[in-house]
Image (tube, rainbow, N blue to C red):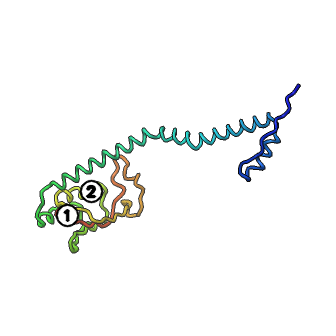
């Protein structure tokens, strides 16, 4: 003897769900189980895609990101130490700062010239190698207590063609294939 199907209670939910409820009631118990199982599977996939997978990706990337941020923090601390050391350096006379700046600029060669402008000095140069420019910048910061206010640099190939690739300059044992042309505005005397 089979049990008679139970009558379902009347639907009292939102009106927009009424057609779905009616369709659910027409399904056989086996079909209801299959639809319920499919809904759980779709829910599990959505839970994985929305919550679990992004969290696992974040956890997997965390050590690399932390190492990158630690290196960045170390660099910032080094720069802060250098800035503090430069601030603590004794003031120098304007004439001495001017002389140190001119001496450093002479080492860049004949294509570099200084021009005084109001409260700053402007260096205009062309065909200067990256290492020579970096050494000049270090020297004027330490010797003349100069602070860069503005800089415009254009990378050029050694033969004069513009926009040379930076990788060409890094070939071991090769002469610098890249030079720079531009202007640098400086404040003298350790202006802070």
Residue at image point 25% right, 69% down: 122
* Residue 184, picture quadrant: bottom left
In the rendered image, the residue lying farthest to the top is: 1
Along the viewing direction, whichever of 145 and 65 lies nearer the viewer: 65
**Seen in the image, is 70 located left or right of residue 18?**
left
Residue 150 percent coordinates (x, y): 30, 66
Left/right placement of residue 49 relative to residue 29 reads left
Nearest to the observer: residue 125 or residue 96: 96
Q: Which mark is residue 148?
A: none
Helix, strand or loop under label 1 = loop
User: Which of the image's four quarters has the C terminus?
Assistant: bottom left
Residue ID for mark 1: 191
Dot 2, how many residues are within 10 Å of its Cα: few (below 14), some (14-19), or many (20+)?
Answer: some
For marks 2 and 1, give the CA distance.
Answer: 24 Å
- Residue in the image at 43% along x and 40% along y: 64
Local crowd size for mark 1, using a 10 Å CA cut-off: few (<14), some (14–19), many (≥20): few
Residue positioned 22% across, 70% down in the render: 120
Q: Is residue 48 above or below residue 84?
A: above
Q: Quadrant of residue 114?
A: bottom left
Whole-percent x and y of residue 146?
20, 62
Which one is in front, 81 or 174? 81
- The local secondary structure at tag 2 comes to helix
Decide which of tag 2 and tag 1 comes sooner along the chain. 2
Q: Which residue is mark 2?
A: 132
Q: Which of the 4 quarters of the picture holds residue 93?
A: bottom left
Answer with left or right where residue 168 lies relative to residue 81: right
Judge whether 23 appears above or below 132 on screen. above
């Amino acid at each position: 003897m089979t049990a008679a199907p139970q009558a379902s209670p009347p639907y009292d939910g939102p009106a927009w769900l009424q057609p779905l409820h009616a369709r659910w009631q027409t399904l056989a118990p086996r079909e209801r189980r299959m639809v319920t199982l499919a809904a759980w599977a779709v829910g599990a996939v959505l839970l994985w895609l929305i919550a679990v997978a992004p969290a696992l990706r974040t956890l997997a990337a965390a050590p690399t990101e932390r190492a990158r941020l630690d290196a960045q923090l170390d660099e910032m601390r080094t720069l802060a130490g250098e800035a503090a050391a430069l601030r603590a350096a004794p003031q120098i006379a304007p004439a001495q700062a001017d002389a140190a700046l001119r001496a450093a600029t002479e080492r860049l060669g004949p294509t570099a010239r200084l021009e005084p402008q109001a409260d700053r000095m402007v260096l205009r140069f062309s065909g200067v190698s990256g290492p020579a420019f970096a050494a000049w910048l270090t020297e004027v910061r330490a010797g003349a207590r100069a602070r860069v206010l503005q800089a415009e640099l254009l990378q050029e190939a050694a033969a004069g063609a513009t926009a040379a690739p930076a990788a060409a300059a890094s070939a071991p044992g090769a002469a610098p294939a890249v030079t720079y042309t531009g202007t640098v505005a400086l404040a003298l005397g350790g202006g802070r």
